[in-house]
Image (cartoon, rainbow, N blue to C red):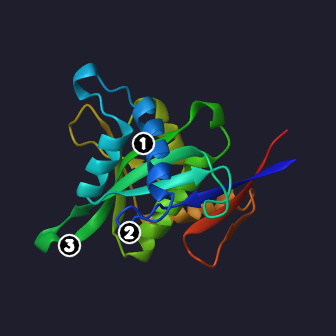
Amino acid sequence: MSNLYYLYRPELESGAIGDYELALQGASILLDAFLYGPNDALTSEEYVDGMTKQSQVMHLVLDSPPLESTPSVVAASTIEYEPEALGIASMVFIDQLAVDEAHRGRGHARALLGDIATQAYAECMRGIILDSLTSATGLYEKHGFEFVDVGSPAHVMTAVPAKVIKAVARAASKSRYRQDPSDRIYYRYIQQA
C-alpha cells in the first residue's frame, strides 16, 4: 500500500483560504521540534505573525490534498533570503526544518530540501545555508551540503541549489516524484508496509 503526500507553500500574504490554519500546524511542529525556553515560548500565531513580518517562506508536507480536503501537516520548514550588496538576496537560509515525530523516516525532510532547492534555483540564488544540530548533519551531507567552519558553536552547512536538486532528484527517482502543473503542489508517493 502507498500513501500520497503533498508538498505545499501556503500563501500567507494573500490570505488564501485554509493556508493560515496550515501555517499554524506547521508552526506547531517547528515549535515542538526546537525546544524553546520559557522566556522564548511562542504561540503558533506569534510564530506565523513574526514569519510573515520577516518575509519568510514556509514549505509544508501534507497528508492529503490542500485544496480538496482538510489536510494535516506532517513536516514543515521556513526559509528566508539573505541579502547581499544593495539588498539583493543571493543566498537562501533554511531557518528551521522539522518532521512530526510520528512521520519521521519517510523522506519528508528530503522532500522539503528538494522544494527549497528548486525554489532557490528558480530564483537564481547562489547557495543555500543553514546551521544544524550535529545529530542532523548526516541528512544534509547526503543531499549535497558541506560543513563550513565559521568559528561558531553552530554547525554551519552550505550547498549550491543545483547540488541539492541533483541529490534529491536521485533519491526521489526511487519514490516516484511528479510535479503538479499549478507549480505549488508536488506529489510524492511513499511506500508503507
Question: Which residue position holds label 3?
Answer: 88
Q: Decide which of tag 1 and tag 3 comes sooner along the chain.
A: 1
Q: Report whether 16 appears left or right of 179.
A: left
Rendered location of residue 90, percent (x, y)? 27, 68
Rendered location of residue 127, percent (x, y)? 35, 63
Question: Who is closer to the viewer here, 172 or 16?
Answer: 16
| Furthest residue in direction top, as rendered | 38
Question: Who is closer to the viewer here, 80 or 158?
Answer: 80
Question: Which residue position holds label 2?
Answer: 14
| Furthest residue in direction front, as rendered | 17
Q: Are the residues tagged 1 and 2 within 8 Å (C-beta)?
A: no
**Location of residue 33 by image quarter:** top left
Question: Which residue position holds label 1?
Answer: 27
Q: Report whether 21 appears left or right of 107.
A: left
- SS class of the residue under badge 2? loop
- Residue pictured at 48% horizontal, 58% vertical: 19
